[in-house]
Image: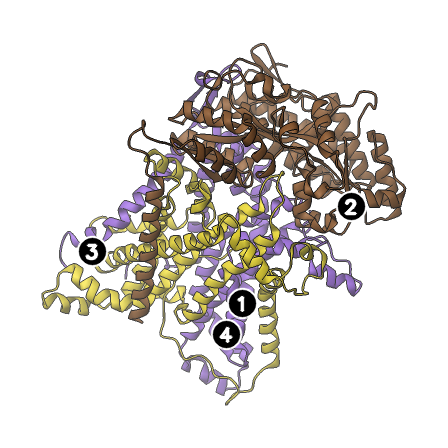
């Protein structure tokens, strides 16, 4: 399981250029390829497995691809009137909406913590840090009981609202605002007659933007991968995200067969959007915990 | 870069609003109760929504929405959490028989004896006992039942020259023969992951793990009868002629497919599981009654089976009870339960109304439902207690260890562990426990 | 900036959300941990069940549960495997990438990062297939060359099997963190050493690793926290084997008590114990390494 960690974009050296003026090292290449193979193996397995029909999945050699990928996708798409795609949309809603709002909330809070002196500042900051350490599993039950008291369980909001607050996000944004928004620039904006909100929106946000994208991506992945919160909050499977939906196909209880083919195909399809997101926004994955920490 | 950020935000927000608004329109409750009632029904049976369409078409004022659940355990967990929270429960709930005492103790299901009227004659006695707990109240209407049945690969049996076992001794002998002829093959597996399966086997032997004695509960999970069953299986596992891996895993699937698991002590709903897991073996399976401890007095146990209950949070108890009654007694509904939702309806007349053809996977066995009916008839009584979940999760752990260790003595000891955990939990909660 | 109300206005949404979805649930969990349900008689019927104060009874039961200490020790052992292996691999890969002596850098970096995109529940399902002897291609291949692979989910291997999933999922992320830190080192710091004839390995050991020390400390801390919270992987693998019990890790016990046994009071007590332990360990670690990472002042 991946860890959420504070990202601090840094002015990096350009990516290393091999070969032109330095020897390439076969050892380095082999080691890196071994690492890549280890990480790709299960992904490759799911790709191959999703091309197999139900009986081939358990009968033929594991890495022998078959031709049933489109049949499997068609079957999965037809399962209960395309419920799987609704799960994918739900995941996108939870992860996209939750990450967008939480990034904004975190940016505002991080900005305040970095750029203002006010009473209670250290209390707030310590609370945020304490929040970082609390496991989600522990929160889920009381969150459910409290949301049920206001009748909000089994709605999109039951998953979205708790995703809006991210102590990590606030912590990162604070480091980030401190590192990238100079006080002089804010003062200048103020001289020009901008109020605090305008200074934040017009001056600070643009300066923090690449860090904010990183925070957004973190939250997006964290929410997309989340299982516990939606599992507890939602009773109607039309509202499920893809993680909860797929695990339901697997655990149908004793009287129903597990839908392995659909689960495997669904797992494969569900990885694709995140892979695309990663590849297109790869340049934002620049995370330096230490730099922020040392500078702070 | 600014554009990227802006468009990410914009897309996310549009998705959010679109999805949330569409959801709001779904869930708006009817403003005027005289007009229309909307009920929700939590069920994990496949295609239950299609079964319910029949009701919705003829009852425009009581519209039922099915929320498909992951299965009996998660559904009950969610229901109990919702009951504790005071809101969030559905109106109608599919509940496995063994969960009913738990649900009653948590005040999660309503007594619908008055609303449902007299239905006793329509259901087998064991199912009726399970939904009344032997009293006057009615905590649900029996929906489906799961008399246990023995499934076996007739081709493998023929080849090995093995007869269908009538007794457990014969079953053990058959297991030895099959495993000796082909060391990769097993007649079955002992599953530490399926307490309901082991409870059914114990029920057949005559055990009843809980009981009521006046105003107190009794617990008899480690009594001599259940010990006999555990020792029997422990012996076979230690001997190595029965596999020790859990059922319902990819590995078990592969074993059913490639013919290394050649028998399965399942229940009447088994054909669906076999078809889903090992479609390629169609036509090679046959079914029979479970082997017996005493061939002269055939008996059986239950695995699975559930009732349809009205929850205590429903604001439309009368309408919900009417729906529950329809679902499980109306001939058309019973037919749909059997044909569309693929369950074995509990109603007595199900065999004549709906189950005239064998399941597709057993088209080679025309008397499938005759055997099932016989299996149901000889099912022994069994009482569940208010903390089945504690006993069952303890079963997972205790028998997990025993099965992994493959020592016969550990199987009996596992029962002591479960007994201890179950009694301890009851006492700790304040239940009166006899003995 | 001077406006008095401004910082509070900026903080308001975060504080409201924090109070509603973090503080309130924690306080509520604390309250629940001191309560219990008292049943009378057979416990059937509406009035038979009342919620009463339990004092510290739930805590006592959690701590004296015979499965509790083994599960804590198990997580300790798990952490001893996962954290060093994951960070070691991440560091080696990051250094190899940073040294720039290969043409496969981009491919390797992307591939190793990829598992981060796979939810733990799905990752465990995939690895489950790769572990089970009868469906595993690894066992299959080894079998063909005459090696009998051990059953990954047997009692002597299961800890490593679970740890492997965590290592697989987390190495790429930590690698990216460390790689980013390495890229931030000014070239002149080690160009001189290189001209003096220092090898890549010497440069890495003597210059690069010390410089990215703070990053290593932080990745260590966050990996440690994630380790203490191990839940999804064993939870998904549990039904596949005999060797993972329902209380295999402390958080699994919380889940079992809350959702299988319907005893949210015990679950709350165990939660509070875990949360307290997490705090103590995290702060203890930070004190130990003297990191100012979490300090507030600019």
Q: Is disc 4 surrounded by few (<14), some (14 to 19) or many (20+) residues within 10 Å?
A: some
| Chain B tint in image | brown
Give the mark toward the camera: 4 or 3. 3
Q: Secondary structure at mark 4?
A: helix
- Would you say C295 lies left or right of B400 here? left
Q: Residue at x 54, y 54 (%)?
A: A76
- Label 3 marks a residue whose chain is A
Where on the picture, by quarter, is residue B123? Answer: top right
The alpha-carbon separation of the residues under discs 1 and 3 comes to 42 Å
Q: Are marks 2 and 4 in contact (CB under 8 Å)?
A: no
> In the image, residue A289 lies at what x, y percent?
40, 63
Location of mark 4 (residue): C206
Callouts 1 and 2 in the same chain: no
Location of mark 3 (residue): A117
> In the image, residue A52 lies at what x, y percent?
64, 60
- Would you say C171 lies left or right of B290 here? left
The chain painted purple is: C
Q: Secondary structure at mark 1?
A: helix
Give the mark toward the camera: 1 or 2. 2
Q: Is disc 3 surrounded by few (<14), some (14 to 19) or many (20+) residues within 10 Å?
A: some
Q: Is disc 2 surrounded by few (<14), some (14 to 19) or many (20+) residues within 10 Å?
A: some
Give the mark toward the camera: 1 or 3. 1
Location of mark 1 (residue): C112
Give the mark toward the camera: 2 or 4. 2
Q: Is residue A118 visible?
A: no
Residue closer to the observer: C209 or B68: B68
Give the mark toward the camera: 2 or 3. 2
- Label 2 marks a residue whose chain is B
């Amino acid at each position: 399981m991946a860890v959420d960690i504070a990202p601090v974009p840094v002015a990096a050296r350009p990516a290393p250029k091999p070969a032109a003026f330095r020897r390439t090292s076969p050892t380095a290449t082999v080691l890196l390829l071994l690492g890549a193979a280890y990480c790709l193996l299960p992904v490759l397995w799911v790709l191959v497995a999703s091309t197999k029909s139900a009986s081939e999945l358990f009968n033929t050699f594991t890495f022998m691809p078959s031709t049933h990928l489109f049949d499997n996708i068609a079957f999965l798409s037809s399962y209960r009137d395309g419920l799987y795609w609704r799960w994918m949309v739900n995941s996108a809603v939870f992860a996209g909406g939750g990450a967008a709002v939480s990034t904004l909330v975190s940016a505002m809070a991080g900005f305040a913590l970095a750029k203002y002196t006010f009473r209670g500042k250290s209390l707030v900051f310590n609370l945020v840090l304490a929040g970082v350490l609390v496991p989600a599993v522990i929160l889920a039950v009381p969150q459910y009981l409290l949301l049920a008291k206001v009748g909000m369980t089994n709605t999109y909001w039951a998953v979205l609202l708790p995703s809006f607050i991210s102590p990590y996000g606030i912590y990162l944004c604070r480091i980030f605002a401190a590192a990238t928004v100079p006080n002089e620039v804010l003062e200048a904006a103020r001289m020009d007659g901008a109020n605090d909100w305008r200074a934040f929106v017009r001056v600070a946000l643009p300066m923090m933007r690449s860090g904010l994208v990183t925070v957004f991506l973190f939250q997006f992945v964290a929410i997309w991968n989340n299982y516990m919160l939606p599992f507890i909050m939602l009773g109607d499977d039309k509202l499920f995200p893809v993680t909860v939906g797929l695990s339901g196909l697997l655990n149908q209880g004793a009287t129903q067969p597990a839908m392995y083919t659909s689960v495997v195909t669904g797992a494969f399809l569900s990885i694709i959007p995140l892979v695309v997101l990663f590849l297109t926004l790869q340049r934002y994955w620049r995370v330096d915990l230490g730099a922020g920490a040392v500078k702070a | 870069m600014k554009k990227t950020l802006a468009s990410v935000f914009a897309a996310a927000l549009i998705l959010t609003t679109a999805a949330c608004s569409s959801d709001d329109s779904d869930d708006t409750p009817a403003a005027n109760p005289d007009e229309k009632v909307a009920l929700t029904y939590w069920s994990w049976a496949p295609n239950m929504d299609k079964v319910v369409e029949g009701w919705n078409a003829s009852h425009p004022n009581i519209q039922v929405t099915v929320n498909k659940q992951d299965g009996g355990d998660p559904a009950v967990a969610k229901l109990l959490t919702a009951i504790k929270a005071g809101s969030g429960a559905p109106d109608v709930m599919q509940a496995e028989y063994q969960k009913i005492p738990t649900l009653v103790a948590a005040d999660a299901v309503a007594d619908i004896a008055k609303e449902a009227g007299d239905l006793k004659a329509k259901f087998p006695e064991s199912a009726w006992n399970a939904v009344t707990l032997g009293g006057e109240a009615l905590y649900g209407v029996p929906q489906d039942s799961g008399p246990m049945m023995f499934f076996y690969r007739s081709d493998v049996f023929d080849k090995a020259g093995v007869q269908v076992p009538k007794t457990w001794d014969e079953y053990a002998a058959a297991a030895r023969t099959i495993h000796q002829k082909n060391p990769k093959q097993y007649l079955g597996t002992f599953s530490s992951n399926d307490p309901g399966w082991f409870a059914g086997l114990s029920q057949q032997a005559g055990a009843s793990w809980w009981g009521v004695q006046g105003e107190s509960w009794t617990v008899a999970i480690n009594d001599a009868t259940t010990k006999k069953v555990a020792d029997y299986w422990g012996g076979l596992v230690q001997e190595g002629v029965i596999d020790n891996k859990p059922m319902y895993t990819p590995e078990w699937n592969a074993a059913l497919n490639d013919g290394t698991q050649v028998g399965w002590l399942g229940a009447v709903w088994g054909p669906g599981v076999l078809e889903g897991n090992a479609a390629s073996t169609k036509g090679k399976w046959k079914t029979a009654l479970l082997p017996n401890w005493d061939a002269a007095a055939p008996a059986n146990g239950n695995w699975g089976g559930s009732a349809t209950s009205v929850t205590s949070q429903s604001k439309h108890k009368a309408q919900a009870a009417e729906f529950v009654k329809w679902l499980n007694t109306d001939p058309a509904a019973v037919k749909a339960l059997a044909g569309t939702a693929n369950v074995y309806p509990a109603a007595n007349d199900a065999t004549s109304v709906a189950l005239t053809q064998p399941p597709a996977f057993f088209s080679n066995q025309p008397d499938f439902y005759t055997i099932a009916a016989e299996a149901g008839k000889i099912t022994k009584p069994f009482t569940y207690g208010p903390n089945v979940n504690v006993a069952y999760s303890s079963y997972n752990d205790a028998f997990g260890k025993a099965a992994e260790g493959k020592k016969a003595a550990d199987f009996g000891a596992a029962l002591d562990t479960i007994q201890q955990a179950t009694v301890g939990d009851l006492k700790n909660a304040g239940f009166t426990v006899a003995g | 900036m001077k406006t008095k109300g401004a910082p509070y206005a900026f903080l308001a949404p975060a504080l409201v959300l924090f109070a509603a979805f973090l503080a309130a649930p924690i306080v509520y969990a604390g309250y629940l941990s001191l309560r219990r349900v008292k049943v009378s008689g057979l416990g059937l019927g509406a009035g038979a069940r009342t919620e009463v104060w339990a004092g510290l009874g739930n805590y006592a039961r959690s701590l004296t549960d015979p499965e509790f200490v083994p599960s804590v020790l198990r997580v300790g052992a798990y952490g001893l495997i996962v954290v060093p292996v994951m960070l070691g691999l991440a560091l080696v890969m990051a250094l190899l990438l940073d040294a720039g002596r290969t043409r496969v850098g981009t491919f390797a970096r992307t591939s190793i990062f990829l598992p981060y995109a796979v939810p733990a529940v799905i990752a465990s399902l995939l690895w489950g297939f790769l572990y089970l002897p009868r469906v595993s291609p690894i066992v299959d291949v080894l079998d063909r060359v005459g090696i009998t692979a051990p059953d990954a989910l047997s009692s002597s291997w299961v800890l490593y099997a679970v740890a492997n999933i965590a290592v697989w999922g987390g190495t790429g992320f930590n690698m990216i963190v460390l790689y980013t830190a390495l890229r931030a080192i000014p070239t002149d710091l080690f160009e001189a050493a290189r001209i003096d004839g220092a090898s890549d390995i010497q440069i890495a050991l003597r210059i690069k690793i010390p410089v990215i020390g703070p990053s290593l400390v932080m990745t260590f801390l966050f990996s440690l926290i994630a380790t203490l919270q191990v839940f999804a992987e064993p939870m998904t693998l549990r039904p596949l084997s005999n060797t993972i019990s329902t209380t295999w890790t402390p958080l699994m016990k919380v889940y079992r008590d809350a959702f299988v046994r319907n005893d949210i009071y015990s679950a709350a007590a165990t939660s509070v114990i875990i949360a307290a332990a997490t705090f103590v360990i995290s702060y203890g670690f930070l004190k130990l390494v003297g990191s100012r990472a979490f300090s507030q002042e600019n």
